[in-house]
Amino acid sequence: MNEGKIFLHLQAVKDEKGGVFFLLIDPDRTPEKKYLTLTEAAGQCGVDAILVGSSFMLASGFSLAVSLIKESTSLPVIIFPGSFTQVVPGADAILFTSLISGRNPNYLIEEQVRGAPLVKQFGLEVIPAGYMLIDSGMATSVQYISNTQPIPRDKYEIAGAHALAAQYLGMKMVYLEAGSGAKLPVPEPMVRSIASYADIPLIVGGGLTRPEQCSSMIKAGASFVVIGSVIENDPRFTLLSELTEATHPKKVIMV
């Protein structure tokens, strides 16, 4: 599979800044006015790309949300779907994920089969990603909805084997997910272990609430960090700016 322009752009950002910051917007849990205000401020706060998705979409306006977000920013907008129903037109790309840490066939392949014709129809750039749930000390929405068990926090070798399998299956990224609002983020030593074992970029999300956590994940070998729910109570976007700065260890000097 050829690498698309969004994936290549993200790689270039990683090389330039040392890390890539994804802002995750869940239109099911965030009011339209709030997520549009956040979207409009994202570029000025140092966000590199916006993920749009929900583990369980209760409302019916996902397609509209993607369109509104895309209209409100010049940043890449990437769908991070919780199901094939979130494969909609208007985005720049889609994380085409398979829940490789679980053994539920519905999220390993069934949702992907249902969504694939829609991806083709809408002309979305595909970024294949192995999606891995990591125990966060609490039951998360995605764990409940997917009916799968997360990988234990201390089983680095199991997590590494899954990441390597994703690489050998041709996936472009591995997403280590603790879950939205997680009690504990993915352990830094696990990130370091996987980064030294597999050769594809790592995304780390869930439970990251402080700049030093973002910085430590990048230092451990992650290429991307994902922040979502913690920004919802940041009206001046001060925390968002601090989080993005910590994710970008290479200082960009404008001349």
Image (cartoon, rainbow, N blue to C red):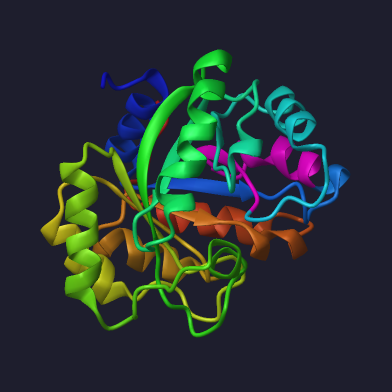
In the rendering, at what x and y percent does residue 45 appear?
61, 45
Specify the quadrant of the image occupied by residue 183.
bottom right
Quarter of the image containing the N terminus? top left
Residue farthest toward the left in the current orientation of the protein: 197
Q: Is residue 210 above or below residue 226?
A: below
Specify the quadrant of the image occupied by residue 158.
bottom left
Q: Which residue appears at 54% of the width and 28% of the height? A: 76
Q: Is residue 35 above or below residue 68?
A: below
Instruction: Please tell me whether residue 51 belongs to the stretch shown in magenta.
Output: yes
Q: How many marks?
A: 0
Q: Is residue 162 left or right of residue 140?
A: left
In the rendering, at what x and y percent does residue 202 appear?
31, 52
The one of 103 and 231 positioned closer to us in this rendering: 103
Q: Which residues are magenta?
A: 35-54
Q: Which residue appears at 31% of the width and 73% of the height? A: 188
Q: Which residue appears at 80% of the width and 42% of the height? A: 37
Q: Is residue 129 left or right of residue 121?
A: left
Q: Which residue appears at 31% of the width and 30% of the height? A: 12
The one of 76 and 117 positioned closer to us in this rendering: 117
Instruction: Please tell me whether residue 42 belongs to the stretch shown in magenta.
Output: yes
